[in-house]
C-alpha cells in the first residue's frame, strides 16, 4: 500500500514538473507576405505567450495589441504585402488553345506558382541583411516555428546564426509537395491529389497521369527555382558554405497543417504531422458595422454573403462580368452582401445587393440571417463556412482553391463553379442549388462531423509546441522515409532485383529442364534400340 502511494506521489510530482516546466523560449519565423497566412498562426502564437512562454515572432504583420512576453520583429518594408493585390482581369485570358488540347489545367498548376518563387527569392535577398532579424537570431531559443510555404531561407539563416533547435514546420494550408518530403510522409500521386489540382483522391488513369506529372514537376520546381537560389543568396552574403537547405529542411521535427480530413480528404499522416484545421477560428465578437446590421434586419428572406477574400481585388473585375453577376444576383429572393472595395463608406445599395468595402466575415457567417456563402475557396473562408455549417458556392481562382472547391463538392458542403465560364443563368442556378434545403441540411451535417474532434485544434497545436519544447529530438518522430531517395522509397531497386531473380530462375529452370529431357531422351532411345534388337 505504502509502496503504491510512494509511486503514485512520484508520478504526480513528475507529471506536475513536466506540465509546469519552465517557460519555453519560442521563435516564430514567418517570411511570407500573405496576410491570410499570418491569420492562421497568430492565435497560436498569442496563446503560447498567454501560457507564460516567451514568444518572439518575425513576420510582416506585427500585432497591434501584444500580450506580455511577446516580442514582434517586423519585416515591414522588405516587400509589398499581399492585400488586395491581384487583378481579376488576369483571369479573363484563359488560353483557348491549351483548353482545346486539354492541357490548360496542367499549365495552370505548373506556371501559376512561379510568382511564389520570385517572391521568396526577393524576400530572402533582403532577409540576409535585415538587422532586427540578425539580432533576434543571436538570442537563444528552445523551439522554432517556421512557416513551410514558398521559402527555406529562414532555415539557412538559423544555421548561420547557430540556432540548432527543434523546428516545427507551420502550414497555413495543406501539404506542399516539398513539405511532404521533409517530414517523410508519402504523397503518392496515385491517390493524393496535388494541392493545386481540381482532383480528389479517386482518379482516372489520365488524372493520375496529370497528378503524377504535377507532383514531381512541383518538387523539382521548388528545388531549382527556390531552394538552390536561396542557398546561393545566403552563401554569397555570408561568404561561406552552409549545409544543403534540403538537408536542413529534412531536420524538421514535426509539422502542423491547417486542414482536417473531413473537409480536405483523408491523406496519409505520421505522428509528427498533425492536422489543426480550424485553430485560427476566433468566435470573439468584434461587432457588425451598423450599415450592414441594418441591411440584415431588413432582409426578410435571408442573406447570401459574397466575398473573394483579401488577396483578390473584386473591383478590378471587367465590367461585363460584374453586370452578369449583378443580373444573376438580382433574380434572387434573398438579399446579398458583396465585399467590393469601390463602394461607399456606408455601403452602396443596388436593389437587393449591398456592396461594402469590408465585412466581418466570420461574424456574419454565424448570423442567423445569413444562409449561404459565395467565395473563392481560400482555406480560411472554407474553414469558417464548415465550422458554421452553411453551404457554399466556391468560385476558385488559383493555389489550393480549385482543390478546396472539389473537396467541398465531394463532402457535400457546396458546389464548385468556374469563373471563366460564368453566365447569368448558370450562376443563378448554382446559387439556387446551394440555397436548397438539401444542401443546407448536408452542410449542417458536414459541419458537425468536422467539429467532432479529440481535442480543440488550437489546444492540440499548443500541446504539440510544448511537447517539442520538452523533448526535442529525444521524441522519435523522425521517420526513416525522409532519408530514402526516390528509388529506395518506391522500392524500384527491390523490384528490379526481384524481376532479375525471376528471369534468372526461368532461365535456370529451362536449362535444367532441357538437360533432364535430354537424359530421358537418351535413355528412351537406347531402350527402344534394345527392344528392337
Ligand atoms: C513574463 O515573463 C516573466 C519572466 O519569465 C514571468 O515572470 C511572467 O509571469 C510572464 N508573464 C506572463 C503573463 O506569463
Ligand atoms: C537537427 O536538429 C537537432 C535538434 O532537433 C539539432 O540538434 C541538430 O544539430 C540539427 N541538425 C542540423 C544539421 O542542423
Ligand atoms: C437590428 O435588429 C436588432 C434586433 O431586432 C436590434 O437590436 C438592432 O438595433 C437592429 N440594428 C439596426 C442597425 O437597425
Image: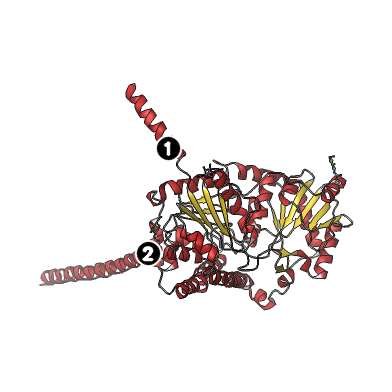
The front one of 336 and 123 is 123
Which residue does the image show at 64% across and 56% down from the upper left?
Answer: 379
- Find residue 174 and report its image quarter: bottom right
- Position of 320 compared to 75: left or right? right
Asked if one can make out residue 288 in the rendered structure from this viewpoint, the answer is yes
Q: Earlier in the sequence, mark 1 or mark 2?
A: 1
Residue 248 pos. (x, y %): 43, 63
**Residue 96 sits in quarter:** bottom right
**Numbered badge on residue 348:** none
Q: Is mark 2 within 8 Å of ligand 2?
A: no
Residue placed under numbered mark 2 in the picture:
488
Q: Which residue is mark 1?
A: 17
At numbered mark 1, what does the secondary structure look like: helix, strand or loop?
helix
Q: Residue furthest top?
A: 1
Give the x, y percent position of residue 445.
66, 43
The residue sitting at 41% across, 69% down in the picture is 242
Q: Secondary structure at mark 2?
A: helix
Disc 1 vs disc 2: Cβ atoms closer than 8 Å? no
Amino acid at each position: 500500500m505504502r509502496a503504491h502511494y510512494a509511486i503514485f506521489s512520484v508520478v504526480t510530482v513528475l507529471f506536475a514538473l513536466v506540465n509546469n516546466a519552465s517557460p519555453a523560449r519560442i521563435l516564430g519565423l514567418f517570411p511570407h507576405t500573405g496576410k491570410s497566412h499570418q491569420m492562421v498562426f497568430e492565435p497560436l502564437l498569442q496563446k503560447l505567450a498567454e501560457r507564460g512562454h516567451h514568444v518572439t515572432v518575425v513576420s510582416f504583420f506585427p500585432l497591434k495589441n501584444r500580450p506580455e512576453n511577446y516580442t514582434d520583429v517586423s519585416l515591414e518594408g522588405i516587400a509589398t504585402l499581399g492585400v488586395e493585390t491581384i487583378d481579376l482581369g488576369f483571369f479573363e485570358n484563359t488560353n483557348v488553345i491549351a483548353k482545346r488540347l486539354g492541357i490548360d489545367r496542367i499549365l495552370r498548376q505548373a506556371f501559376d506558382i512561379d510568382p511564389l518563387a520570385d517572391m521568396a527569392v526577393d524576400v530572402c535577398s533582403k532577409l540576409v541583411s535585415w538587422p532586427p532579424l540578425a539580432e533576434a537570431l543571436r538570442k537563444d531559443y528552445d523551439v522554432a516555428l517556421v512557416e513551410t510555404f514558398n521559402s527555406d531561407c529562414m532555415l539557412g539563416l538559423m544555421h548561420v546564426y547557430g540556432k540548432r533547435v527543434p523546428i516545427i514546420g507551420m502550414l497555413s494550408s495543406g501539404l506542399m509537395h516539398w513539405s511532404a518530403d521533409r517530414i517523410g510522409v508519402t504523397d503518392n500521386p496515385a491517390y493524393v491529389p496535388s494541392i493545386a489540382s481540381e482532383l480528389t483522391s479517386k482518379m482516372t488513369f489520365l488524372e493520375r497521369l496529370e497528378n503524377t506529372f504535377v507532383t514531381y514537376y512541383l518538387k523539382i520546381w521548388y528545388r531549382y527555382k527556390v531552394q538552390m537560389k536561396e542557398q546561393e543568396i545566403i552563401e554569397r552574403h555570408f561568404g561561406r558554405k552552409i549545409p544543403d537547405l534540403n538537408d536542413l529542411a529534412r531536420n524538421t521535427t514535426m509539422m502542423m497543417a491547417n486542414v482536417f480530413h473531413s473537409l480536405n480528404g483523408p491523406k496519409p499522416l505520421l505522428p509528427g504531422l498533425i492536422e489543426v484545421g480550424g485553430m485560427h477560428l476566433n468566435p470573439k465578437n468584434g461587432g457588425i458595422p451598423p450599415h450592414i446590421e441594418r441591411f440584415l434586419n431588413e432582409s426578410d428572406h435571408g442573406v447570401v454573403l459574397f466575398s473573394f477574400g483579401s488577396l483578390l481585388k473584386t473591383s478590378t473585375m471587367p465590367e461585363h462580368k460584374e453586370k452578369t453577376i449583378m443580373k444573376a444576383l438580382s433574380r434572387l429572393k434573398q438579399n446579398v452582401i458583396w465585399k467590393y472595395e469601390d463602394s461607399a463608406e456606408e455601403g452602396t445599395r443596388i436593389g437587393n445587393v449591398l456592396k461594402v468595402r469590408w465585412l466581418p466575415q466570420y461574424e456574419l457567417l454565424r448570423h442567423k440571417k445569413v444562409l449561404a456563402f459565395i467565395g473563392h475557396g481560400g482555406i480560411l473562408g472554407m474553414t469558417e463556412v464548415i465550422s458554421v455549417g452553411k453551404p457554399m458556392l466556391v468560385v476558385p481562382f488559383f493555389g489550393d482553391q480549385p482543390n478546396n472547391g472539389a473537396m467541398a463538392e465531394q463532402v457535400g458542403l457546396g458546389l464548385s463553379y468556374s469563373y471563366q465560364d460564368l453566365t447569368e443563368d448558370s450562376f443563378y442556378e448554382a446559387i439556387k442549388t446551394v440555397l436548397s434545403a438539401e444542401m443546407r441540411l448536408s452542410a449542417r451535417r458536414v459541419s458537425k462531423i468536422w467539429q467532432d474532434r479529440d481535442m480543440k485544434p488550437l489546444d492540440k497545436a499548443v500541446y504539440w509546441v510544448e511537447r517539442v519544447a520538452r523533448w526535442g529530438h529525444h521524441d522519435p518522430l523522425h521517420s526513416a522515409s525522409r532519408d530514402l531517395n526516390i528509388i529506395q522509397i518506391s522500392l524500384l531497386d527491390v523490384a528490379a532485383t526481384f524481376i532479375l531473380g525471376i528471369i534468372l530462375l526461368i532461365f535456370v529452370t529451362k536449362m535444367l529442364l532441357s538437360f533432364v529431357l535430354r537424359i530421358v531422351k537418351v535413355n528412351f532411345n537406347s531402350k527402344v534400340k534394345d527392344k528392337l534388337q
